[in-house]
Image (cartoon, rainbow, N blue to C red):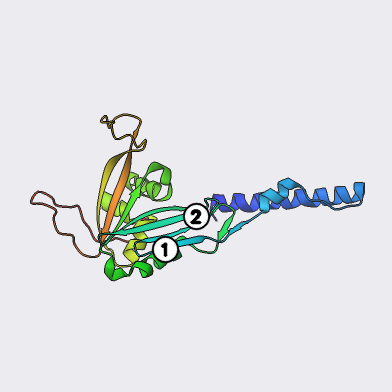
Amino acid sequence: MSKPIVLTHLTKAIGILLCLFIFFHNQSAFGQPKCSDLFESAFKIHVADVQVEVGPRIYHVFEPDGWFYFKAKLEDRQVNIRAFLVNHEERFRSTIRGTDAFANMIEHFGKDNIDVIQGRWFPFSVSNFQSFKKARERGHSMEEAAFSTWTGRQAAKYGYVFVDVNIERANIRGNRSLSNQNSENFVEYIKANFYKTMPSPKGPSHRPRVTRSLPMIE
């Protein structure tokens, strides 16, 4: 059993004991059983129904309070994905999972209409970015690291078994007049393109770093 799970069970046990203490204390002192707001906030599960926005070139599911966000756009047979999936350890339950959203997106656009699935992972996107970095720290190639991410695993599941991945820089302030890419307005991000078949070179000197998907990196 992992430490986070042990700590979670320990926290729940302590909360139950506190609630029982408050229950009997209030019953003896005031004759009315009452549980603390602390206990309620510690055990309350946030359950949400996601909202859906779909169109010929868009598939967007989201939870209004920001716990869940998955948006995919189809342009020139390429799907660009942006997603925020809440940490599974947090107290949240949704009517849809990230894997369901990905599957529904593939079905909505039609796999035959998608040649490329693109992910752009910024430091603040957490899950994919951290998975990629951890895999690189363990000595894996950029391509292996890309397939170790959540998006990479989903793409491979649907047959997108080749990847071209690069580290790029983006202007996060939106000021196009800035030219100094070393300024704090720019941040490094990871761009990964997942393909069903080996992509054609973009030019005589361009040879994309592409590899077939590998088993998930633990």
Tell me residue 142's x, y (percent): 27, 49
Query: Mark 2: few, some, or many residues within 10 Å (few <14, many ≥20)?
Result: many
Structural crowding at the residue carrying mark 1, measured as other residues with C-alpha within 10 Å and reported as few (<14), some (14–19) or many (≥20): some
| Residue 54 left/right relative to 162 | right
Q: Is residue 89 visible?
A: yes
Q: Is 163 on the left-hand or right-hand side of 71?
A: left
- Compare residues 137 and 109 and report the one nearer the observer: 109
Quadrant housing the N terminus:
bottom right
Labels 1 & 2 near each other (Cβ < 8 A):
no
Q: Amino acid at mark 1?
A: Val
In the image, residue 3 lies at what x, y percent?
A: 55, 50
Q: Position of residue 43 (x, y in %)?
A: 67, 53
Q: CA distance from mark 1 to mark 2?
A: 16 Å
Q: Which of 125 and 142 lies nearest the eye of the viewer?
A: 125
Left or right of 196? Residue 81 is right
Residue at 65%, 50% (x, y): give it.
Answer: 10
Q: Which mark is residue 54?
A: 1
Given the image, on which type of amino acid does mark 2 rest? Phe
Q: Which mark is residue 203?
A: none
Residue found at x 82% / y 51%:
34
Under circle 2, the secondary element is strand
Task: Say if 40 sits above or below 100 in the image.
Answer: above
Instruction: Return the disc, 1 or 2, that comes first in the chain's sequence.
Output: 1
Instruction: Determine the image quadrant of residue 116.
Output: bottom left
Label 2 belongs to which residue?
68
Q: Quadrant of the C terminus?
A: bottom left
Q: Nearer the viewer, mark 1 or mark 2?
A: 1
